[in-house]
Image: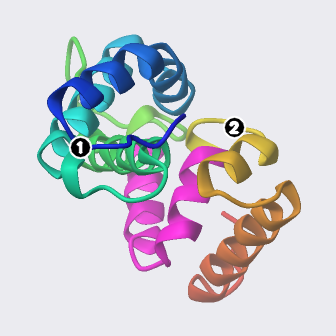
Amino acid sequence: MEVPVAGTDADFERFVAENAVALHRFAYLIAGDREDARDAVQDALAGAYPRWSRMVGDPGAYLRRSIVNAHVSRWRRHRRETPVAQVSETVEPGAPADRVLDAMVVGDLARDLPYRQRVALVLRYYEDRSFAEIGAVLGCSEGSARSIVHRALLDLRGRTGGRDG
């Protein structure tokens, strides 16, 4: 993705025309859903437009980071909501209610992790992304992505007293 020479509206429009497909593909890989990807790209572009004339460096990196942040924010807002057709009066072991409770506990624990560790865990365990993909999103090598996930898991285990389940 090229750096704009001048921060004009025409430069912004040209950048979007040349990079829209790549940005949508990236957002889809992060979100796993076309509508969420479109929303994330739209939000990122809307946020970048007023800053376009002051943007330094690679605007693509700024937009990719905005897309990741938008996806994480949406995930946080919606992760607790699980619509069901009918509410059951009883809860069976291993039922969806147990999984929701587990997700809430993990979410509460992960909220205190450093940003990169939190993003890496979300991408790895909620988005099922490879370490290479995580490294690409975080701007680091595959080995560094492995280390980030490993440190995050160690931190979570330390907070739970080493319990695995």
Residue at (45%, 17%) from the top-left corner?
A: 18
The N terminus sits in image quarter: top right
Quarter holding the C terminus is bottom right
Instruction: Determine the residue positioned at 77% across, 40% down.
Output: 130
First in residue order: circle 2 vs circle 1 = 1
- Whether the magenta-drawn stretch holds residue 102 is answered as yes
Question: In the rendered image, which quarter is residue 107 located in?
Answer: bottom left
Instruction: Look at label 1 and name its amino acid.
Output: Gly
Rendered view: 17 above or below 96: above
Which percent across, then down, holds residue 121?
A: 60, 57
The residue stretch that appears in magenta: 98-124
Q: Is residue 71 visible?
A: yes
Q: Which label was assigned to residue 91?
A: none
Q: Residue at x 38, y 59 (%)?
A: 56
Give the label, 2 or 1, closer to the camera. Answer: 1
- Label 2 amino acid? Arg
In the depicted structure, whether residue 29 falls above or below residue 98 = above
- Disc tally is 2
Q: Which residue is mark 1?
A: 7
The residue labelled by disc 2 is 129
Q: What secondary structure prevails in the magenta region?
A: helix
The image shows residue 110 at horizontal and vertical percentages of 47, 69
- Determine if the magenta segment contains residue 111: yes
Q: CA distance from mark 2 to mark 1?
A: 35 Å
Q: Residue furthest right?
A: 143
